[in-house]
Image (cartoon, rainbow, N blue to C red):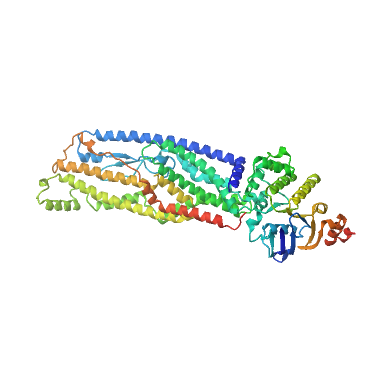
């Protein structure tokens, strides 16, 4: 095995095509890391400035009615997870900040893509693009003729006559493809680790796991490439087959799966979603409308509960109390409708998972985004955190209003120092364990790809 | 050492080899003569275990080639008609690789010594083999065979395409190996070379061994006549 490994490596490094392709990949990776790293730090800096500025705005509101402050609102900014610099996932399309205000749950807005021109359709040079699309191509270029060349050169008979076990040759060839890929990716991840190690939230465990996922993904491609080379009659056939495998796995299946998932579990349009939310909101209590049926019902219940005859006799400001109850009803409505969106997404995700058996790209892509905390799960985790913070904020404001003023006292104002008492929005990305729990199926599928491709490679009859 | 027992190979209705039995003892060189398609290469491939027989068996050192494919190959060295090497590797690297996978871990000076023994010019040792002539490649092949220290040597038209000098050097090397007790089975068209180096000669036609001689018992003209008679080239035989 060692002899074959050394021989194959010598052949690879003496092949001008491989040297050129390898050089291009390393150059592209270097550029991608540099671009991504500078963008990451730029966005991180912008977030830090915006966050500080927004908090300053909040704390400097002066004397004001708490419910006015609730409508004044504040922004929560999505912090970047350090590994997001390696795999940006959906970050480009998902919003970066959420405006949190009274009565309304807003989605994240200001996605980076809206600041770009139509050229954004071409995509961008990022490490995940090189890792997921280009390195498999390099593997194909390096390995498509691993076995066919032995037949075409005529070395196969001399090789066979040496009494070497075919699996020794196979493992030597396998390692000769895997080791250069390990070297390139290890270098990239080490650089990434060094660049990111000082950042808050960075964990070497996540970085190593991400690297492991890519190594498994590449091992699958190496297995398929060697299997194809072993079974093909000529190098040209092997190359065409492998390029077809790459096109289907990395381009066709992901896009087709997206279409299938979307047609099976369609998302409502924004208009439909807003209308549904509005209809359900109107069915319940509107904190600002004391004359509605629901408001009257609450009024009666509250008077009965506190055994008083009028709202003015209540030990708190009933207006603020009603406002808070309205908030609670609206929060439930949003929760219900967002849950419906999650259910649709769960359906789409299950379609993706089922079709992952057609392409190792899909589980690798999902795992990569998950570990980098740039997938939908992570985005929703952030949006849920902002909604929780919004609810807490509204309660904080309404409670103060209710406790410190009396019914009808809309002129009540809190002291300017009050705003500082609201805890800051502090978001922590999902833990690695939680990510693994969410991505367990993708991990199983990717491991399945690895095992099955290995088994096929080892059991194929057409051996050297 | 090299034995075939009633070995037969059929491809559908076509019989490539028909009940061939022969035995090559240590220190013997057995040359198989015959026209194209006579079954010479099929015999070599069967003994190498590259193809399975329809019936019969081939033995190396008493062990069945088909039951002990990997094990018997350790005792065999093989030089094909058109020996090909890895073009991006040097002669030394090719020799190092093939001897390495054959189980021999040799040092640089040992590798150089083998190439000298095979007759390759020293200035070619560290050159990539992509520009090597057939003769030069055959010499590297010989070095690979010697490196293996095999007890059985299988040669399939090894001198085809070699210039007379290289062919003569090759013959001398075989004699040297013969002296070391190596059993050699060689398929060839070259009657002159066969007569010169063989201890035994067999003439094949249509998958059958038609005639066998002890080389010392027959002259070159007699061998030539026997060959032409066997091939039914009556006019030429006269």
- Name which residue lies at 81% across and 58% down: B214
Q: From the viewer's side, name the closer residue of B19 and A305.
A: B19
Q: In which quarter of the image is residue B123?
A: top right
Residue B15 screen position, x and y as percent = 73, 64
Q: Residue at x 35, y 42 (%)?
A: A109
| Residue in front for this viewpoint, B28 or A163 | B28
**Vertical position of residue B133 compared to residue A49: above or below:** below
Q: Residue at x 65, y 40 (%)?
A: B108
Rendered location of residue A213, percent (x, y): 46, 47
Vertical order, B25 against A57 (above or below): below
- Decide if residue A264 is on the left or right side of residue A413: right
Q: Residue A436 in the image: x percent, y percent?
A: 39, 50
- Relative to A12, is A441 on the left or the right? left
* Quadrant of the rendering where the C terminus of chain A is positioned: bottom right
Q: In this view, does A183 lie to the left or right of B51?
A: left
Left or right: A279 in relation to B61:
left
Q: Is residue B160 among the parts visible in the rendering?
A: no
Q: Farthest right residue?
A: B238
- In the image, farthest residue toward the front: B180
Say how many tags the image has: 0
Q: Which of B1 and B99 is in front in this view?
A: B1
Q: Position of residue B140 (x, y in %)?
A: 71, 45
Query: In this orientation, does residue B225 appear?
Result: yes
* Residue B227 lies in quadrant: bottom right
């Amino acid at each position: 095995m060692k002899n074959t490994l050394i021989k194959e490596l010598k052949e690879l490094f003496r092949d001008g095509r491989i040297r050129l392709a390898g050089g291009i990949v390393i150059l592209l990776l270097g550029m991608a890391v540099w671009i991504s790293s500078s963008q990451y730090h730029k966005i991180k800096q912008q977030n830090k400035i915006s966050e500080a500025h927004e908090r300053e705005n909040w704390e400097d509101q002066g004397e004001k009615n708490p419910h006015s402050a609730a409508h004044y609102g504040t922004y929560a900014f999505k912090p970047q997870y350090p590994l997001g610099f390696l795999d940006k996932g959906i970050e480009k399309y998902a919003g970066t900040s959420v405006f949190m205000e009274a009565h309304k749950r807003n989605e994240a807005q200001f996605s980076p893509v809206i600041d770009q021109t139509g050229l954004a359709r071409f995509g961008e040079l990022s490490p995940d693009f090189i890792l997921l699309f280009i390195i498999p191509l390099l593997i194909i270029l390096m390995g498509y003729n691993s076995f066919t060349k032995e037949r075409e050169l005529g070395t196969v008979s001399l090789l066979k006559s040496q009494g070497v076990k075919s699996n020794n040759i196979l493992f030597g060839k396998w390692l000769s493809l895997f080791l250069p890929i390990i070297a390139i990716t290890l270098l990239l991840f080490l650089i990434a680790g060094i660049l990111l190690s000082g950042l808050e939230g960075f964990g070497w465990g996540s970085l190593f796991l991400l690297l492991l996922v890519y190594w498994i993904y590449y091992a699958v491609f190496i297995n398929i490439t060697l299997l194809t080379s072993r079974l093909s009659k000529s190098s040209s056939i092997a190359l065409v087959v492998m390029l077809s495998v790459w096109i289907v796995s990395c381009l066709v299946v992901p896009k087709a799966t997206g279409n299938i998932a979307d047609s099976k579990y369609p998302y409502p349009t924004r208009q439909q979603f807003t209308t549904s939310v509005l209809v359900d909101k109107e069915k319940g209590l509107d904190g600002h409308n004391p004359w509605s049926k629901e408001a009257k019902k609450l009024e009666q219940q509250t008077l009965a509960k506190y055994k008083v005859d009028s709202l003015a006799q209540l030990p708190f400001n009933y207006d603020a109390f009603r406002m808070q109850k309205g908030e609670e009803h609206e929060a439930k409505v949003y929760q219900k409708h967002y849950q419906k969106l999650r259910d649709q997404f769960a359906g789409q995700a299950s379609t993706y998972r089922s079709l992952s058996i057609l392409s190792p790209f899909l589980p690798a892509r999902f795992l990569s985004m998950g570990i980098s905390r740039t997938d939908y799960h992570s985005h929703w985790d952030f949006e849920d955190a902002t909604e929780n913070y919004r609810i807490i904020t509204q309660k904080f404001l309404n409670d103060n209003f209710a406790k410190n003023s009396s019914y009808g006292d809309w002129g009540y104002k809190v002291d300017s120092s009050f705003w500082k008492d609201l805890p800051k929005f502090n978001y922590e990305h999902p833990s690695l364990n939680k990510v693994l729990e969410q991505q367990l199926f993708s991990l199983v599928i990717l491991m399945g790809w690895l095992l099955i491709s290995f088994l096929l490679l080892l059991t194929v009859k057409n051996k050297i | 050492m090299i034995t075939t027992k009633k070995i037969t190979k059929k491809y559908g209705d076509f019989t490539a080899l028909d009940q061939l039995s022969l035995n090559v003892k240590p220190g013997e060189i057995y040359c198989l003569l015959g026209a194209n398609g006579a079954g010479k290469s099929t015999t070599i491939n069967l003994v190498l275990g590259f193809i399975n027989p329809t019936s019969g068996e081939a033995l190396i050192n008493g062990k069945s080639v088909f039951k002990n494919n990997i094990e018997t190959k350790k005792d065999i060295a093989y030089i094909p008609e058109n020996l090909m090497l890895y073009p991006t590797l040097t002669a030394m690297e090719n020799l190092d690789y093939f001897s390495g996978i054959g189980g021999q871990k040799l040092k640089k000076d040992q590798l150089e010594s083998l190439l000298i023994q095979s007759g390759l010019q020293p200035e070619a040792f560290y050159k990539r083999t992509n520009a090597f002539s057939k003769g030069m490649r055959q010499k590297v092949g010989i070095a690979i065979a010697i490196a293996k220290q095999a007890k059985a040597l299988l040669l399939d038209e090894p001198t085809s395409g070699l210039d007379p000098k290289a062919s003569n050097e090759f013959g001398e090397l075989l004699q040297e190996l013969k002296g070391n007790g190596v059993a050699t089975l060689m398929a060839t068209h070259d009657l002159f070379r066969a007569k010169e180096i063989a201890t035994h000669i067999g003439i094949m036609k249509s998958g059958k061994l038609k005639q066998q001689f002890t080389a010392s018992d027959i002259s070159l003209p007699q061998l030539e006549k026997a060959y032409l008679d066997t091939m039914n080239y009556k006019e030429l035989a006269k």
